[in-house]
Image (cartoon, rainbow, N blue to C red):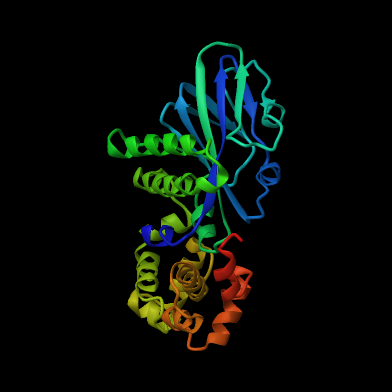
Amino acid sequence: MDDVLSRIRLAGAIFLRAECTAPWACESPSAGELRRLLKSQAKRLVLFHVVAEGSCWIRLGEERVEASAGDVLVFPYADQHAMGVAEHVPPVHISALLPSPPWDELPVIRHGGGGDRTSVVCGYLCCDAPLFEPVVNALPPVFIVRPPSGPIADWVNASIQYALDRSTTPTAQRGMAVRLPELLLLEILRLYVQSGPPQLSGWLAALHDPIVGSALAALHGEPARAWTLDELARRCACSRSTLNERFSRLVGRPPMRYLAEWRLQLAAELLQETTLAVAAIAYRVGYESEAAFNRAFKRTMGRPPAQWRANGRFG
């Protein structure tokens, strides 16, 4: 998992702080409303809340989750949800509480009846990388992670506070604050998987499958190798049909397509982080033809390699 997550480049930020006092209840924007609010064109938005102080409930459809200070709630599909401390209070839509844009500083919502205080920090991440889809699609609509006491919890708390402090600085100086949500989510995903949730599915389950896990390890370990389905099946000690069926069912795409996308994800990273020529990058990730690499990269990433390098991944 770390191998994939470390190479998936996300963008995002903390975008809202809510200071609420009992009794209170709020309703989040829908995924579409959130995209318009954040002016994001990304295919995938992941929303998260960090309960900095107090406690509250979160309701998404029929599911209800109780959260308290230190908990991190993740909404992989940015689904609309309600949160609060009072069942008898109708939820107020966030849009009715937000100050009018533009915002020179992090907007703060103040809402409620003056009782016990709850403070929630809201952030988002976006990503267009194809390999992020199997990871996210394996997650439930909402999950909660309670960082264990000790260095990890201290780091989470310190990171959030740092991002909040930086959010009041001019936009040009917010680079590290913007990157913190990415680091935070990757750590939260690791903690979630390590906690042993009752039903892992999809890509996360694939990591624990003896056949598919072996295939993933082989493809990640030697991405430039001229793999064939036959050779990969021999490596996993199974038939072609068994490998293809199990891999496709758990990962969401057949092995050779996954390999192609993994190579392009590695190439995108090299374009961003090195000055290697495009031809050298193509060869390094397993392409013998620069022209074939250019076509595949543009088809998958939406832009040719040179433009990707010049404009940045979300430019």
Residue at the outermost left position: 150
**Coordinates of residue 15 in the picture (x, y in percent):** 57, 39
Q: Quadrant of residue 227?
A: bottom left
Left or right: 203, with 100 as reference point: left
Tell me if 90 is positioned left or right of 228 in this view: right
Q: Is residue 75 above or below residue 240?
A: above
Is 5 left or right of 173, judged from the image as shown?
left
Residue occupying the point 68% across, 26% down = 97
| 64 or 240, nearer to the observer | 64
Q: Name the residue rendered at 45%, 74% in the picture.
A: 275
Which residue appears at 53% of the width and 35% of the height? 168
> Can you say whether 90 is above or below 71 in the image?
above
Q: Is residue 17 above or below residue 22?
A: below
Would you identify the image quadrant in which residue 292 lies? bottom right
Q: Which is nearer the eye, 103 or 218?
A: 103
Number of disc labels: 0
The quadrant of the rendering that contains the C terminus is bottom right
Residue 181 in the image: x percent, y percent?
47, 45
Residue depicted at 63% across the width and 56% down the height: 43
Q: Position of residue 194 (x, y in %)?
A: 34, 46
Location of residue 295 in the rendering, given as x and y in whole percent from the top left corner: 61, 80
Front one among 228 and 154:
154
Instruction: Give the quadrant of the N terminus.
Output: bottom left
The residue lying furthest to the bottom in this view is 289
